[in-house]
Amino acid sequence: MVKTIIWETKMDVALARAKAENKNILLDFFNPG
Amino acid sequence: MDAVTYPNEGVIEFIQKNMIPLRVAYDAQPLATDFNLKWTPTLITLDADGKEHQRTVGFLPPEELIPSLLLGIAKSYFDRERFGEALAALDKLLKGYPKGDSAPEAIYLRGVCGYKSTHNPKPLKEAYEQLQAKYPSSEWTKRAYPYRLL
């Protein structure tokens, strides 16, 4: 089992995966500090 | 979120199984402008066309993030009139996280889904009755108040 969240960093990649995997996207705007 | 919520094993499993996680800095353009970003953390549920269906602002602990994401998933189906899938997500939320902050809104939305998929007002009245019994002080109980007359 994966022990960390593997984040996408590009919207176009996330959208392509969402279509292919029939999932929604969790978009997290964060402050990297 | 990085210290408490995202390292949580249940959160990791839920997100990897049910969503495509996308993380960008608050000042990343053009996304920050496109989504009118004002504060962090801001979590937005998007469908595969990039359309927004829910957003939350501020920290959420693990026991609130998962039901919040389920509510976002349910809304994404509801907005596309896929009521069966919306109801499945709402039932999962209410079964797994009945005491979470998302539960009252889930009951409300379940009633609306039931009505819109059947044109029978009974689910709306049932939603009000459940809200009044379980969450009498919730804003969603107030919003459902007219349905008591159905």
Image (cartoon, rainbow, N blue to C red):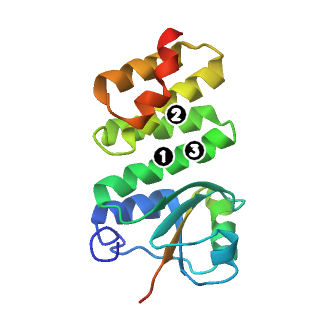
The residue type indicated by label 2 comes to Leu
Secondary structure beneath label 2: helix
Outermost residue toward the top in this view:
B150
Q: Is residue B88 above or below residue B55?
A: above
Image position of B106 (left or right of B79) = left
Q: Is residue B29 visible?
A: yes
Q: Which mark is residue B75?
A: 3
The N terminus of chain B is located in which quarter?
Answer: bottom left
Q: Which mark is residue B71?
A: 1
User: At 36% from the left edge and 35% from the top edge, which residue is drawn?
Assistant: B138
| CA distance for labels 3 and 1 | 6 Å
Count how many numbered circles sit on residues in the image: 3
| CA distance for labels 3 and 2 | 8 Å
The residue type indicated by label 1 comes to Leu
Q: Earlier in the sequence, mark 3 or mark 2?
A: 3
Which percent across, then down, holds residue B132?
Answer: 35, 23
- B27 or B45: which is nearer to us? B27
Query: Mark 1 belongs to which subunit?
Result: B
Image position of A18 (left or right of B140) = right
User: At 44% from the left edge and 34% from the top edge, which residue is drawn?
Assistant: B140
Q: Is residue B107 visible?
A: no
Q: Which mark is residue B109?
A: 2
| CA distance for labels 2 and 1 | 9 Å
